Image (cartoon, rainbow, N blue to C red):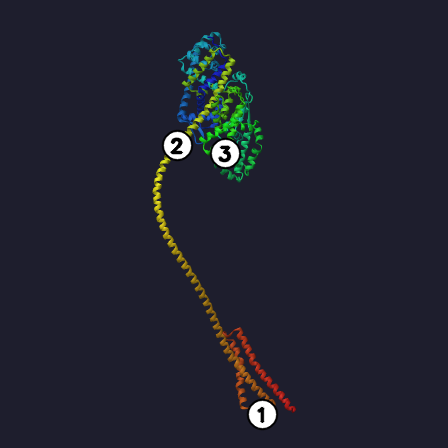
């Protein structure tokens, strides 16, 4: 059978496919992560780990892939998660890596010393250091060119099979030294020289890691002609838009950013265009409007925003309050309105365009409606009410899936032939796609998680020269590839078997092999993506089953508790009935007591009212008595004053009248009859009356000076008494004088 020699590009593809299919790359990336942590000698966060991998080995892992590797290493007790969300090596792993590093460094030095000694022995005329330098370069080239085929040299030690690198190494040296150099190489690759053997195997592992991570630019250029589509059109789901806009917190946000970033960086290798459906745009605007109405009435002070972000609010609403913390006075209307009114423009600026589709036609298609109803029935059976999607959301998901599949060729069986893909962070939509592929016997997914699409796109990103240079550096090898373990050997044998198989198959030209291997490589990535989905579905299913079992056990325990509680409640019910009867009797007694108390209270109120009336009557009587006393006092005062008046006013008036009369008679007699002698009565009356009249005139004045009689009205009464006393005297005197004068005149006139 004719054996053909495969081109380096075909061998590179075989390495890439077999190393990924066998799972060798996942094991190797775990070892590299441990090496990065060991070199840092301090805890690193997930972001710092990603930067360290980029710096040390030139690869950029999606966050989900890195996190998955971290979880695997944690389950193997290699990593410890710190409280600040960083990771460090466990002490046992750190000690093991330190010991392995020192061992590898010792082997490197031993390998170099053995080569220099052998070269000096067999080629004494050549500078051994220069030969070692040239050999190191040739060995690196041999690893790059031969790859897994170099294992034949390790296993058999036949240098003649490696003419593609051996001749270039011998060419710079004089021909007479060829035999000595070959002996030196034979001793270097001898099975007994374990230190040098381990060094070569580490170089092979480093080369394997580079081949499994990304393809060379030359290999990608060779398979470029097999690709029928040079542009990938990705239709985005609603939640993906919110991640792009930074409007919610989702574990997949970093994957979304990675996808957008790699799409921009990979434009010259593979054009990626992002689209949204009109229905997706409408759904996003409805969601934003509902979030606006949820928070628009809240007065957004900085203090309020600080409190709000800690509350169980939707993540979109929390994004608003997070912005309000940094911008005092920010309103919900100001924050949300641009996204609601100009979402199409904002997305266009981010390179996302609207894929115009007849939404109303899809909404009326029977196959779409059947899918929606089927999903509604499934969610009714499996998902709690508060987490179920409504008809509109299920219709949106079904339309999205059918739009993607309708734009694919019916006979598309390889990723090279597919132009349209959907990407979503909604696992229910991804599960719907998986179920549809199962029923349609389709091998290619229509809906991918962002990190899986990143892995798919990275197939077209060539590895940089720095990747191999950093991996095969003599100082890096002990750090990342300590030993060649059974898994490495199994992967090597698998690669060699694949190379041998394709070398012996002459029916396929190399152009066909390129397409077959490239398709296999892409399918491997998609299967890996689908496998990760399956793992998540399995975990979710197991979690649901565990939750279901927990619920069943809880229900069983609850039933027992309810039975015991029911018996206890029955006893309590009997006790409660007895207590109720006792309470009823007590209530009757209490009612009677209350009635009596009410009667007593009524009687007390009546007594109080009676006492109040009696008090009022007593007050009236006291007032009446006071008035009577006042009246008696006034009467007594009046009587006293009357007596004073009688004795000090009336008597003087009478005496004044008598005096007036006597005076009148006396004067009249004098005037009318001057010769008439006075009588004894007249003289006696005048002698008695005149002093008494004088006393009566003076007495009121002294009486008015007495304190008890010093009243205004009494003073006036006494004044009146004086007038009354003076009046008759004046009248008597005046009248008598006038009468006497008149009578005298008449007598003189002889009338």
* Labels in figure, total: 3
The residue depicted at 38 percent of the width and 53 percent of the height is 591
Residue 564 placement: quadrant: top left
Which type of secondary structure does the marked residue at label 1 adopt?
loop
x and y percentages locating residue 451 in the rendered image:
49, 25
- Counting residues from the start of the chain, the first of labels 3 and 1 encountered is 3
Could you tell me residue 53's position as x and y percent? Answer: 48, 24
Q: Residues within 10 Å of mark 2 (few under 14, many from 20)?
A: few
Whether residue 117 is visible to the viewer of this picture, yes or no, is: no
Q: Earlier in the sequence, mark 2 or mark 1?
A: 2
| Of the image marks 3 and 2, the number of the one nearer the N terminus | 3
Give x and y (percent) for residue 598: 40, 56
Q: Which residue has dot 2 on it? A: 550
For residue 381, what is the image quadrant? top left
Mark 3–mark 1 Cα distance, whole angstroms, equals 149 Å
Q: CA distance from mark 2 to mark 1?
A: 161 Å
| Dot in front, 2 or 1 | 2
Question: Is there CB contact under 8 Å for labels 2 and 1?
Answer: no
Q: Are marks 3 and 2 in contact (CB under 8 Å)?
A: no
Q: Nearer the viewer, mark 3 or mark 2?
A: 2
The residue identified by callout 1 is 676
* Observer able to see residue 387: yes
Q: Position of residue 705 (x, y in %)?
A: 51, 75
- Depth check, front residue: 292 or 303: 292
- Name the secondary structure under disc 2: helix
What's the mark number on residue 315? 3
The disc placed on residue 433 is none
Q: Is residue 604 above or below residue 387?
A: below
The foreground one among 19 and 316 is 316
């Amino acid at each position: 059978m004719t054996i053909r020699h495969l081109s380096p590009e075909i061998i590179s593809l075989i390495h890439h496919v077999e190393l990924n299919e066998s799972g060798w790359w996942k094991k190797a990336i775990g070892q590299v992560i441990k090496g990065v942590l060991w070199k840092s000698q301090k805890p690193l966060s997930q972001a710092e780990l990603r930067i360290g991998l980029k710096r040390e080995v030139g690869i950029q892992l999606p966050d989900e892939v890195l996190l998955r590797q971290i979880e695997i290493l944690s389950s193997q007790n290699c990593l410890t998660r710190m409280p600040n969300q960083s990771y460090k090596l466990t002490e046992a792993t750190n000690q093991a890596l330190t010991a392995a590093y020192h061992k590898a460094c010792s082997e490197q030095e031993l390998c170099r010393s053995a080569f220099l000694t052998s070269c000096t022995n067999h080629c004494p005329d050549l500078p051994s250091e220069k030969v070692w330098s040239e050999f190191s370069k040739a060995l690196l080239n041999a690893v790059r060119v031969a790859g897994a085929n170099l294992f034949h040299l390790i296993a058999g030690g036949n240098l003649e099979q490696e003419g593609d690198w051996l001749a270039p190494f011998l060419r710079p040296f004089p021909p007479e030294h060829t035999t000595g150099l070959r002996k030196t190489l034979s001793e270097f690759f001898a099975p007994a020289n374990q230190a040098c053997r381990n060094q070569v195997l580490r170089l092979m592992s480093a080369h394997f890691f580079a081949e499994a991570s990304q393809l060379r630019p030359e290999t990608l250029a060779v398979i470029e002609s097999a690709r029928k589509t040079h542009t990938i059109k990705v239709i985005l789901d609603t939640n993906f838009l919110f991640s792009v806009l930074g409007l919610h917190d989702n574990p997949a946000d970093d994957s979304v950013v990675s996808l957008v970033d790699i799409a921009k960086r990979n434009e010259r290798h593979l054009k990626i265009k992002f689209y949204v459906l009109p229905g997706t745009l409408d759904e996003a605007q409805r969601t934003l409007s509902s979030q606006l109405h949820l928070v628009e009435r809240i007065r957004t002070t900085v203090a309020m925003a600080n409190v709000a972000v800690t509350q169980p609010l939707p993540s979109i609403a929390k994004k608003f309050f997070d912005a309000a913390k940094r911008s005092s006075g920010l309103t919900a209307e100001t924050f949300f309105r641009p996204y609601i009114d100009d979402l199409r423009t904002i997305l266009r600026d981010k390179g996302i365009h609207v894929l115009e589709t007849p939404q109303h036609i899809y909404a009326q298609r029977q196959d779409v409606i059947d899918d929606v109803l089927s999903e509604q029935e499934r969610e009714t059976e499996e998902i709690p009410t508060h987490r179920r999607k409504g008809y509109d959301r299920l219709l949106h998901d079904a339309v999205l899936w059918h739009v993607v599949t309708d734009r694919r060729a019916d006979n598309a069986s390889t990723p090279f032939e597919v132009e349209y893909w959907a990407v979503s962070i909604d696992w229910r939509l991804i599960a719907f796609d998986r179920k549809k592929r199962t029923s349609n016997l389709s091998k290619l997914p229509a809906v991918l998680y962002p990190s899986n699409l990143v892995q798919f796109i990275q197939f077209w990103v060539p590895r940089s020269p720095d990747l191999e240079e950093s991996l095969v550096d003599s100082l890096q090898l002990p750090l990342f590839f300590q030993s060649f373990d059974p898994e490495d050997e199994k992967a090597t044998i698998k690669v060699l078997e694949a190379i041998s198989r394709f070398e012996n198959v002459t029916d396929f030209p190399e152009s066909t092999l390129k397409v077959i291997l490239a398709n296999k490589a892409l399918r491997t990535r998609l299967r890996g993506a689908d496998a990760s989905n399956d793992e998540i579905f399995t975990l979710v299913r197991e979690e649901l089953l565990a939750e279901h079992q927990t619920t069943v056990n809880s229900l069983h325990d609850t039933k027992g508790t309810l039975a015991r509680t029911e018996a206890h409640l029955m006893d309590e019910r009997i006790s409660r009935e007895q207590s109720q009867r006792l309470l009823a009797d007590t209530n009757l007694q209490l009612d009677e007591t209350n009635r009596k108390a009410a009667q007593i209270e009524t009687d007390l109120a009546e007594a109080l009212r009676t006492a109040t009336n009696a008090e009022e009557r007593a007050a009236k009587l006291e007032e009446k008595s006071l008035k009577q006393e006042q009246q008696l006092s006034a009467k007594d005062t009046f009587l006293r004053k009357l007596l004073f008046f009688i004795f000090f006013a009336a008597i003087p008036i009478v005496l004044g009248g008598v005096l007036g009369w006597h005076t009148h008679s006396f004067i009249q007699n004098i005037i009318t009859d001057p010769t008439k002698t006075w009588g004894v009565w007249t003289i006696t009356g005048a002698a008695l009356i005149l002093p008494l009249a004088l006393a009566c005139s003076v007495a009121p004045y002294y009486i008015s000076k007495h304190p008890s009689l010093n009243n205004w009205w009494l003073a006036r009464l006494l004044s009146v008494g004086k007038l009354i006393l003076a009046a008759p005297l004046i009248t008597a005197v005046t009248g008598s004088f006038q009468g006497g004068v008149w009578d005298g005149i008449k007598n003189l006139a002889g009338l």
